[in-house]
Amino acid sequence: MDLQAIRSQVDRCYRERRTDQAEQILNAAYHQAREEGDEPARIAVCNEMEGLYRLMGQKQRCLAAAQEALDCLRACGMEDTVPYATTLLNYATACVQFGQAEEGLEHYAAVERIFRTAIPANDYRFASLYNNVGQAYMSLGRPSEAARGLEQSLEILKTMQGREMEIAISHTNAAFASLAAAELERAERHIRQAEAAFDAIGYRGVNYDALLAAKGQLLCRQGDDRAAAACYAALLESTERTYGRNQTWRNTVRNLAVIWRRAGDEEKAAYYAALLDDAD
């Protein structure tokens, strides 16, 4: 079975937003692997199916595909190997996405134990693991632990070349976690470093918009309403240009109305309140 060709076909379906066709391709490959008794191919296809069903939000199929891959790996005597840990990491990430974050964290701990015996401490896979751990803690409302996980990921990313975008995004995520934990100095440090990383690559896209939202929130918490309003105004313009007047746009307009009212500028507060009314 030509797994690389199958992956290329599935990737093309993703780009063209044809998940139904991607599912057909993977189902055909799965049945072929089972008929031929090709367990390595079956494991690979199950991993691809796990990713597809996670994207589609189909919990039971997603977890079943990942579990089947894990069962096959165990049957092949590959438990406690890197391929097993990688599949378990995917399973854990699916658990977190589908509201089972505590279970996901247990699996992440098992992944870390295997990785520590099999790959270097500065391997990118550790960065991915710690990032996922951070996201799991955020979903559980434990932002201080989330920030620590994200910072562990950053320590590894910073040793690598060509990871500037991931570094900037991770700093932004760590800033949000720090804000949720009311650790404003920590949040400010991450925001400064995210800005520097985005500036280094000259990036001003949707990921930078998330940084604007974090910075606006920080400035509000610090009492600098006018600087916060400038951040939110930039976010508003970018959001409308990219996505139109979506929910993020509405939330940003609402924030601007509140900020200007608090700053004592009733004219601007009224302007944004009216803008929101018009959009409704």
Image: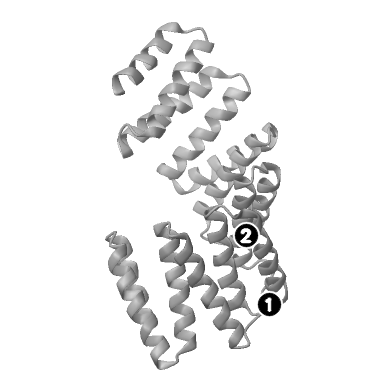
Crowdedness near tag 2: few (<14), some (14–19) or many (≥20) residues, C-alpha within 10 Å: many
Q: Quadrant of residue 18?
A: bottom left
- Looking at the image, is 68 positioned above or below residue 158? below
Q: Quadrant of the C terminus?
A: top left
Under tag 2, what secondary structure?
helix
Image x and y of residue 170, in percent: 57, 49
Question: Can residue 93 be seen?
Answer: yes
Foreground residue, 179 or 233? 179
In this view, the mark in front (1 or 2)? 2
Q: CA distance from mark 1 to mark 2?
A: 21 Å
Image x and y of residue 276, in percent: 35, 20
Q: Which amino acid type is marked by label 1?
A: Ala
Image side of residue 204 versus residue 75, left or right: left
Question: Can residue 2 be seen?
Answer: no
Under tag 1, what secondary structure?
helix
Image side of residue 211 versus residue 123, left or right: left
- Looking at the image, is 77 positioned above or below residue 238? below
Residue that appears at 50% across and 70% down: 64
Image x and y of residue 163, in percent: 53, 57
Q: Which of the numbered marks, if any, corresponds to residue 118?
A: 1
Given the current orientation, which residue lies at the most extreme bottom position? 36
Q: Which amino acid type is marked by label 2?
A: Gly
The residue beneath circle 2 is 104
Asked which colour scheme the image uses, the reply is: one colour
Image side of residue 191 versus residue 272, left or right: right
Residue that appears at 72% across and 76% down: 117
